[in-house]
Amino acid sequence: MEFNEYNESVKNWTNGILDNYRKDAELTIRYCHELIDYGEKTADSKLLGFGYYHLAMILYCLNDYDNIFDIVVRAIDHLEKAQSWSMLARACNILGIITSGRGNQPVAYDYYLDGLMYCKKYGLLEEQSIINVNCGALNIKVGRYKEAMEYFQKAMEYIASAPDEPSYHTRMISLYENMINCKVLESDFTGIDEILEIVEREHLPYADAIDRLGMLISRTFYMHKSGQIEKRDECIRRIDGVITQDMLFMDLIEDFFVYLEVLFESEKIDEFWHLMELMEPMINNLKVTSMQMRLLGLKIRFYRKHHMGAEYLQAAGLYYELSERKELEAKAMIKEVIELRANFEKVNRAKKKIEKENKLLAAQSETDPLTGMANRRKLNIQADEMFSHAHKCGHNFAIEILDVDYFKEYNDNYGHQEGDRCLIAIADCISKVAGVHGGFCARYGGDEFVVIYENISKEDAKEYVEELRRKVMELTLPHRFSKMLPIVTITQGMYCDVPKEENRVWDFLHVADEILYSVKTDNRGSCRVVDRAEFMLMSGYGTTIQGQA
């Protein structure tokens, strides 16, 4: 997203956010608030969307869940208006992560699908791969392992194709972790050793401590479930020796719960309580009731297994209190979801209204208000397209100019209102004949009209021109002031040939106009279709095409 059109203060804030995003959280938050304040004063959705989105991302990295949902919702509102599709897709992804963490998987999945919709609509491959990984992880939670692997394979297609991306190794490790966990939960251990070898050889040398820890937990989970006890215990010793409070990030929260289960089932009591003591402050600070209940549930199982009655009863009572709180949170979440959905619908309705109005304005700008035919502006566009296609394919391009015989006399004697009715009737005839034969027609100006056909023979062109002349006469519109017949007639000139490289559409139009003039001179009320060779032989004509042949 570029901000070159803004003042220096805005540029400083946006650059400060991007430069300090992963270095100085406090400074980044300050820049976000300054940008948001300015965006509120100027009612600028581009600035507000950018500010709220990055504020939410910083809070997510700081494990601060208090206001993050509301901030992401605000970001989405402005990102949609500003058409910042990449950040909008990522914002939907964050909502999915938050909602999944709160224990509402169906709503989380819905947010992910919203994000994927934007990705597919606007070609956001990187964002699509991120969301696909999270969709796969969510499917693991609900036991849909086949569907999870399908999402992981989709994500792999993009991630593996972009090895130069700064986050390439982190994303590959995360993807492989999820694939290992999915296969283990499905009791399918085939290929896991090969995956571990690939990660060890190609990605871990470039990984940070957090990425290494996540993969080590997945390896431990695999060793535990596949019965490789000695290797599992070695992994546990390594994890217990490196894990600290500073390594507890939201991105690894699911890994830590998996690891706690391994420690519980393995009777690694000291390691179990070590991790429990590290996780409790983090989970309590998050204030996410579903996570607190999940951690407390593990404690309850431990107390029951080891017959610790007093501790069990105390934990069970707290669990009940949390369940009541979760019910209230669920209602609040439903309200938030409904409000967000309503806001989405409001924005979409406004967007559709604008699109409809723009289409209507575009149609009006290309339509002749009297006859409803295409106007000269639309003629320019359509004629160029048909001419270019005919030249490319080697087809005939036929363009006809016609006008109403003695129309000035008609207007002067019958009045302009009757003159308009006459033009409307003739335009209707032209539209019907051209429509039946796949042609395009437009009002050229005054009583002049243009008809264009592509890929028709000269014989068909003559037939269509004669058909139109006959249809107009069949209207039998009275014209007592015509010097030909007592009804309205038209004179037509058409040029029909294959365009050459040096020709332009207006060369053909100019020649058609000369042909029309020749018909008026020789036999007004009739029609003539001429090709290149015939036009070159016409006395006094041919300069346009001959000069460019």
Image (cartoon, rainbow, N blue to C red):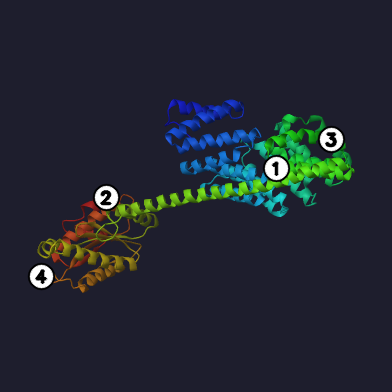
Compute the Cα span from label 4 to label 3.
108 Å
The Cα atoms of the two marked residues, 2 and 1, are separated by 81 Å
Query: Mark 3 and mark 2: span between their CA atoms?
Result: 89 Å
As drawn, the label of residue 548 is: 2
The numbered dot on residue 480 is: 4
Label 3 and label 1: CA atoms lie apart by 24 Å
Label 4: few (<14), some (14–19) or many (≥20) C-alpha neighbours in 10 Å: some
**Which label sits in the foreground, 4 or 3?**
3
Q: Is residue 265 left or right of residue 480?
A: right
Dot 1 corresponds to which residue?
289
Q: Nearer the viewer, mark 3 or mark 2?
A: 3
- Mark 4 to mark 2 CA distance (whole Å): 44 Å
* Mark 4 vs 2: CB contact within 8 A: no
Amino acid carrying mark 1 in the image:
Thr
Please tell me which residue lies in front, 329 or 480: 329
Instruction: Find numbered disc 1 in the image and state the secondary structure of the residue it sits on.
Output: helix
Q: Nearer the viewer, residue 456 or 293?
A: 293
Mark 2 vs mark 1: in front: 1
Q: Amino acid at mark 4?
A: Arg
Answer with mark 3 or mark 1, whichever residue precedes in sequence: 3
Q: Secondary structure at mark 4?
A: loop
Residue type at the position of mark 2:
Gln
User: Mark 3: which amino acid?
Assistant: Glu
Marking on residue 271: 3
How many other residues sit within 10 Å of disc 1, few (<14), some (14-19) or many (≥20)? many
How packed is label 2: few (under 14 Cα within 10 Å), some, or many (20 or more)?
few
